[in-house]
């Protein structure tokens, strides 16, 4: 190995990242949204958010305690139109902005 990246390797990396940005990332976030939407109504409510946030901590995926106040603040940030429900577009837009851009870091986070 020369330690140098060839033009073909660079093109391949660019194509993979473009494909990731073009749909796979959104698809992954939509899959997470569907898990959070426990009752399948197409929206996440405060209880559904709290349930999954606490489950992630119980499973060791996140540290700290998920309090009612933290849930209220987080929900208010995600609920872009302030209707008391988070739809898939609000969920995806919020986490697109919050999560790492690089695909491996993103996948490790979700």
Image (tube, grey):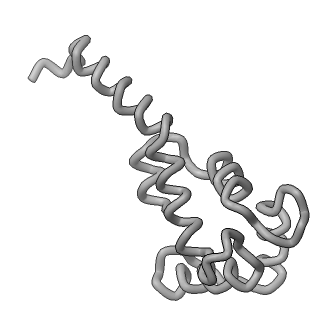
Extreme-right residue of the structure: 82
Where 62 falls versus 27 (above or below)?
below
Write down the quadrant of residue 12 in the picture: top left
From the viewer's side, name the closer residue of 25 and 63: 25
Q: Residue at x 68, y 59 (%)?
A: 91
Where 7 falls versus 92 (above or below)?
above
Q: Residue at x 32, y 27 (%)?
A: 13
Extreme-top residue of the structure: 7
Write down the quadrant of residue 10 in the picture: top left
Residue 86 horizontal/vertical position (percent): 75, 66
Residue 108 horizontal/vertical position (percent): 42, 58
In this rendering, would 85 be left or right of 89? right
Q: Residue at x 63, y 86 (%)?
A: 51
In this rendering, would 110 be left or right of 51? left
Where 1 falls versus 66 (above or below)?
above
Residue 105 horizontal/vertical position (percent): 45, 50
Extreme-left residue of the structure: 1
Write down the quadrant of residue 1 in the picture: top left
Where 37 falls versus 25 (above or below)?
below
In this rendering, would 65 be left or right of 46? left
Q: Residue at x 71, y 70 (%)?
A: 43
**Could you tell me how many numbered marks the image carries?**
0
């Amino acid at each position: 190995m020369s330690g140098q990246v060839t033009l073909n390797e660079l093109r391949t990396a660019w194509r993979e990242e473009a494909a990731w940005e073009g749909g796979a990332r959104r698809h992954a976030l939509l899959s997470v949204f569907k898990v959070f939407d426990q009752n399948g109504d197409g929206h996440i409510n405060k209880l559904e958010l709290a349930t999954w946030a606490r489950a992630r901590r119980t499973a060791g995926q996140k540290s700290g305690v998920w309090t009612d106040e933290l849930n209220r603040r987080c929900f208010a940030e995600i609920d872009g139109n302030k209707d008391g429900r988070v739809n898939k577009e609000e969920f995806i837009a919020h986490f697109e902005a919050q999560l790492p851009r690089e695909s491996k870091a993103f996948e490790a986070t979700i």
